[in-house]
Every structure is written in structure tokens, then in C-alpha cells.
Amino acid sequence: MLYRAGPRIPLGGLEEVKMFQKLLRWLRAQIGTLFGDAPGANDIILSGQMENALALWAQMYETGGPWCTAKNDLHSLHIAASVAREFARLVTMELQVSLSGSSRADYLAEQLAPFLDKLPNYTEIACALGGAVFKPYVSGDRLLVDVVQGDCFFPTTFDTTGRLTGAIFSEQLKRKNTIYTRLERHEYAAGVQTIQNKAFASSSTASLGHEIPLTNVPEWADIAPEVRIEVERPLFAYFRIPLANRNDRHSPLGASVYAPAVDTIHDADEQFGRLLWEYEGGQLAIDVDAAALRPTGDGGFQMDQRSGRLYRGCMTGNVADRTLFNVFAPALRDEAYLRGLDGILKRIEFQCGLAYGTLSDPQNVDKTATEIMASKQRSYSTVKSIQHALQVALDDLLYAMNAYADLYQLVPAGSYTAVYNWDDSIVNDPSERKQLFWQYVQAGKFPMQRYLTEFEGYSQEEAAQIAAETSAENTADETLTFAP
């Protein structure tokens, strides 16, 4: 068997990050010994800057950032997750992928459908961590796709175009007191894909332990230790977020969509903390004199109603000099703090390539038509570049799925053509575009039949019939009007 019968099993959260860092350190020291005969460089292309950046992006996505701790008393706005989610929504909300050409195309479309249903989630993770790997595998007579997040694989080689051609993927199983780890290395060179699998057993997470045969683990018993396959490109797809990587300018890996705004996101969380403190510190309270309270008999005093929140301690001193109580009700400065927060959110939108009003208050932006278009164009440009990168990755994924369909003879051979439909409604309002093309129809510059199918949802046959009837009516009206 060329491939495992199931997906990589993630550890999840902080545990996965720690295991990734441990595996990375171990692989750097042992990769030459483990995979010395494999083609390609025996090294992990992941610098210390990128390792730290991946850990930071993951923490910002999951918890808000390392600054959001109980010690700092900061509540995260979870801006990083919001930015990644918004980009994923804009990138995938109108995507339609259709395959045609043969029964092979129909089979690939059926196998790809479950992956496409969850593509917005996968795109969100990729946007957060700078990229993801889409790796198909065979399960029975089906083709499934394993999505490996940006901080869960170890890149080893890239070609001159920036395509990922080699990587190491890991999978772990826990049985009683033993941890089993499988390393799966892919290397593509000179038209040959080399896949190597090695298994290890350890009693702790401190190390991989000692190497064991794959047959010792039932789930891996049918996996071949090494396979070489002649193909035209790698049997996996790397979806790289196409942004400049400022954390490591020489790294071929992608960067998070919110990487340019890390410090500003930190500022936003701190400003939000000040706003919360303003509400907390400005709560209504009453300072009460001890003379106004009833003794409880045990040396204390009894307060009425919300004693723990409304009343604050007891005033002491000469009662004749002041009142028995004092109301604390300062004027809140929340408007000033909100304006400051809104300004920071606008800066984050600009740094991340989002339109103003995505995170900030939309009522305070885009005063002119020119400003509206410029803001939308910024978001449109970023989204289109990510869409292009995603389409390249989907093409590579389909190629790999088609190659496995050939290798395992899952369906008769045949050609396929993939068509991707991306909508540009981010910039062009659909209602405005519809109105514009209706004007073209009225001016005779756009076919009525095509307008009905694209904008009104009619089938080709229905649109042709309506267009013919409309044309006949217009001809009859002209004959009646201009007849001598």
C-alpha cells in the first residue's frame, strides 16, 4: 500500500505546538541518518524566525496572543481570528468548482465535494498560519484529503518557482503507556515522487524513542516503507498565502494575513482593556459612614441590599463635619476610548489589506465615492491574490487525486477539465451590475438570452424562448407603428 488508510491525527492546541517544536529539533539532528538515501536536501527549511512566527500566529488565532494573560488582565478581542475568518469568507463565498470531460471527471468531482464543503474552514486556518498542505490518500475505493496546517509539517525542498516539492509529515498514536510516531517523507525530483515511512515507539513525549517496523502498529501494517512513483508534479498541494514574509524575507513559506498587524493588534487589546477598566472603575458606588450602619453583634456592620457591590467600605471621622454617605458616580470617558479603539482598528484594516468598516465602525469611514472604491479595491486586491493561490493549490490537489485514481485503478481512465468561478461582488455591487447589463440589453449591446441566464436564473431553453417572444413582440410593435 502506498499510503496510510487514514488522516494525520493532530494533537491539538498547545500540546501540538510543543510536539512540533520537539520533532523539529529532533529531525534537524537526525534527518541525514533517517533519510540519507532520499533525493533532495537533507535539511528542514524552517528558520528560527519562522518557527517563532508560526507559534505566535497560532497562539494569536487560538487565544488572542501571549499578552492576553490573567497576569496582564487583558481580554482579547480575537482580532486575529476575525481577520482570518473574514478573508476566508471573502475568498470562498462565491467559489464554484465544476469538473467535466469523462466518468473520471465525475468521480473526481464526487470525491472532491466533501473537501470543498469544508474549504472555508481550511482557508481560514491557512490564512491564520500562512498556508496549508492538501494531501490526498486512498481509503477503500474513495479518495479523501488530509489538510495539514502550517505548523504541522516540516518543509524540506522547494523548486525554483517556489513550489513545495519535499516535506515530512508526522502522525502519532497513543496506546496505554506507549506513544507511536510515524514520519512520512515526500520528495519530488526529476519526475519521481519518493515516499518514505518510518515508525518509532517511545514511553514519553520527550523523544521519538527507537525505530520499529511499521507492521508493529496495525493501522500502519499495510504501508510500504518506501515507494517511488513516476509523476509530473508532487502528490500533494501547498496552499501558500501570497503575502510578503516580513518575519523571514528569505523563507519560501507563506505568512499569516495578520502578520503585518501583530503589534497593532496588541495595541487594540490594550485599548480594549482600558475601555473595560473605565466601565469597571466608573461603576456607581456609595461610601457609607459607620454611624449609618447597624452593628451585627460580632464587631461588624450590616449593610442593605447589594453590599458587596454598591457600598464601598465605611467613612470615618467626625460626623458633624460631613454627610453620612457619599455617592461615587463619575462621568464615563468611554466615547474617547471608543474613538481611540476605532482608530486602531482602522490601522489594522489598512495593514491587513481589508476595507475600512470590516472591523471598525462603518459609520465613520468612506465619506466619498472615491474613498469607498479605494477601500474596496484594497480588499479586492488582497482577496484576488489569495484566490489565485488557492486555485493553483486546487489544481495540484486534483492532479494528485487523479494520479492516485490511476495508481489504484479506482475508476476507468479519462480526462477532466476544471473550471473555477470566482465572483467579484466585493467591488461590484450585484444589483448595480445587474442594472448596468440591463441597460446594455436595452441599448442592444448585450444579448437578452445571456442576461436572463446570468442575472435572472433562467435555463438556456427558457431564456431562448423568452428572448424570442420579446423579439417577436418588438417586431410587431414596430410594424404597427411605422406601417404606411
Image (tube, rainbow, N blue to C red):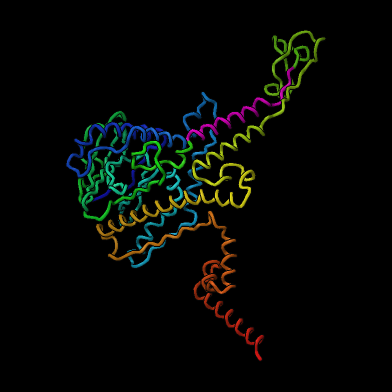
| Depicted 269 relative to depicted 94: above or below | above
Q: Which residues are magenta?
A: 262-287
Q: Quadrant of residue 108?
A: bottom left
Position of 480 compared to 239: left or right?
A: right
Residue at figure coordinates x 39%, y 51% from the top left: 389
Name the residue furthest front. 370
Q: Examine the residues drawn in magenta and state their main secondary structure.
A: helix
Residue at figure coordinates x 61%, y 34% from the top left: 340
Locate residue 370, reporting x and y percent: 59, 51
Name the residue furthest bottom. 484
Locate residue 448, reporting x and y percent: 55, 73
Decide which of 408, 367 is in the foreground and name it: 367
Name the residue furthest right. 320
| Depicted 332 relative to depicted 296: above or below | below
Name the residue furthest top. 318
Q: How many marks?
A: 0
| Depicted 271 relative to depicted 125: above or below | above
Position of 361 compared to 78: left or right?
A: right
Query: In which quadrant will I find the C terminus?
Result: bottom right
Is residue 219 in view from this perspective? no
Decide which of 333, 372 is in the foreground and name it: 372
Position of 55 compared to 308: left or right?
A: left
Q: Is residue 264 magenta?
A: yes
Q: Is residue 372 magenta?
A: no
Locate residue 307, reporting x and y percent: 70, 21
Is residue 304 in view from this perspective? yes
Locate residue 347, reporting x and y percent: 54, 39
Position of 184 compared to 309: left or right?
A: left
Residue at figure coordinates x 27%, y 40% from the top left: 182
Q: Quadrant of residue 439?
A: bottom right
